[in-house]
Image (cartoon, coloured by chain):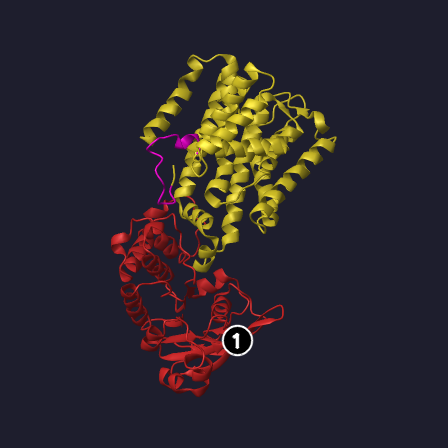
Amino acid sequence: MRRALLLLGAAALALFPLVGGAFYLQLLAKIMLMAVFAMSLDLLMGFTGLVSLGHAAFFGIGAYALYLLSPEYDAADFWVSAPIAISAATLAALAIGVLVLRTSGVYFIMATLAFAQMFFYFATGSKLLGGSDGVSINVRPNPAILGWTPFDLGNRVQFYYVALAAMLATYLLLRMVLRSLFGHAIQGIRASEQRMRALGYPVFRYKLAAFAIAGALAGLAGYLSAAQYGSVNPEFFGWQMSGTVLMMVILGGIGTLYGPILGAFGLTLLQELLTELTKHWLLPMGVFIILAVLLLPQGIGGLGLAWRSPRPEPVDD
Amino acid sequence: MTEPVLRTETLSKRFGGLAAVSDVALDLRHGEVHAVIGPNGAGKTTLINLLSGDLAPSSGSILFEGREIAGLAADRIARLGIARSFQRTTIFRDFSAFENCRLAAQARLPTSMRFVRPALSQRAVSDAARRVLALVGLEAAAERRASALSHGEQRQLEIAMTLATKPKVLLLDEPLAGMGAEESRHIVALIAALAERHAVLLVEHDMDAVFSIARRLTVMVNGRVLESGTPEAIRESAAVQEAYLGGAEPQP
């Protein structure tokens, strides 16, 4: 049942460009990149038990890396710049992880937030990174291989499919990881860190690896987001960004992989709808989120659907 | 007599001004149950925490197979072959009984930094999990969620998990606490059987159980070893009678 619904959703998204207008193509592409970002956070929150309020740090690093790798009036090579951007986010996650993973609970939340804010203020004050106005990427990265161009990131429809591919690939990758020995180990850590340590697991290393994987995927999402709009600003690092993606995870259903996807769609579409209706959209948005948290403790993914049964095994898809 | 597997010398743990464990010398041999008894606050659980690495000793040494392990992290000590159960049942409550034991057996692998192959396709790990479940008599409950098991079954599950790591030393912290008579008998028989192939350190308040399976007893009072010896010697020791068995009210 779940698999059927997921396939149906993927098929609908794949066919959408046949009917959707330019505005909605762009909006859905943005949502799918946020879904990548949200899934990466859920690897930490929902599966390793690490609630981060600074996940935007890695999103922003992926985005600014593309800017730094792009020549001013020429395209960056996609196959060079994307791996470098993802590596930069991964390395940053390793370095920050070594420090913040020594804390836990609310201290971990504050430490992650503090690091992301450091990046935010650095970007705001840095001439190289364009200060608070941000920077423009004038030419989209070029994915040409020996003269052959498999896709064009400047084309709305093709970008849409790149975003869809990124979302599906992230989903499948994380599903594989969660079913592996590593995936079971981190879910054991979430369930009882003390028991894992007593069994002989070097808990810190597994948390750090999870933090690095989450950072890498957030970097990918940031890179593609920068490529989509051709502009990057300090808000990419902002706590609102971290908070939004955290909300997507909670709203969609923490501890599942489809939850963050549903959350990304739900939250962004709701925001679009409310901004159409009123300029005071934050008020109904806040009411909605409070109601959602009260009425749907398992998120949209748990919306009275029988297939979201409690999970006796640390396997998930 | 065989060499002790685990031996402590002048082992001490102070919390600020409080000496929770003072100058404890203790040895544990393969094939025996060595019980540590004493009133609440005697330092028995602290002693287990020191041996398992959950606490670092303030001074003294812990030798495992002749090697100094005092101060090593808990996970290192566990991988050396010293497994423990907790006074307060510590299991993965939301996972099935099988997955609890499977994760424990997985800890035996050199590393779990493996990201591709499904964990459940690792046949040897799953088989080891089923074996320990059968050993404690929980094979029928394998697919049940751990939180849905009875208190006694959860205690059994925790022992099964420690066994899945194939330890040489078992540190059991009040395995019979809160158990009914029937469940207790079952666990006592299990511990007696395990002692044939492990060195077992047993902290327990149930004196009938302790005197029936322990080959040696150590009595602790206020963090110190009051007396150590065979059950007969302990039963007849005037000091123990005074401090614990006779004079003071024995623990329920």
Relative depth, front residue between B94 and B42: B42
Where residue A250 appears, as percent x and y from the top left, is 49, 34
Label 1: chain letter: B
In the depicted structure, whether residue A271 falls above or below residue A208:
above
Q: Is residue A146 visible?
A: no
Reading the image, the residue beneath label 1 is B222
Q: Quadrant of the C terminus of chain A?
A: top left
Query: Colour in which chain B is shown?
Result: red
Please provide the residue range marked out in magenta: A299-315
State the SS at label 1.
Answer: loop
Q: Residue at x 31, y 73 (%)?
A: B196
Q: Residue furthest left?
A: B140
Give the residue at x 30% y 49%.
B144
Q: Determine whether, in the image, residue B246 is placed left or right of residue A54.
A: left
Location of residue A220 (image quadrant):
top right
Residue A208: image location, x then y, percent: 53, 48
Q: Is residue A58 visible?
A: yes
Please tell me the colour of chain A.
Answer: yellow
x and y, in percent, of residue B55 in the image: 53, 65
Camera-side residue: A26 or B148? Answer: B148
Query: Please, is residue B246 above or below residue A51 in the view?
Result: below
Indicate left or right for A221 with A132 as reference.
Answer: left
- Is disc 1 surrounded by few (<14), some (14 to 19) or many (20+) residues within 10 Å? some
* Residue B31 as seen in the image, left or right of residue A169: left
Q: Nearer the viewer, residue B14 or B112?
A: B14
Report which quarter residue B135 is drawn in: bottom left
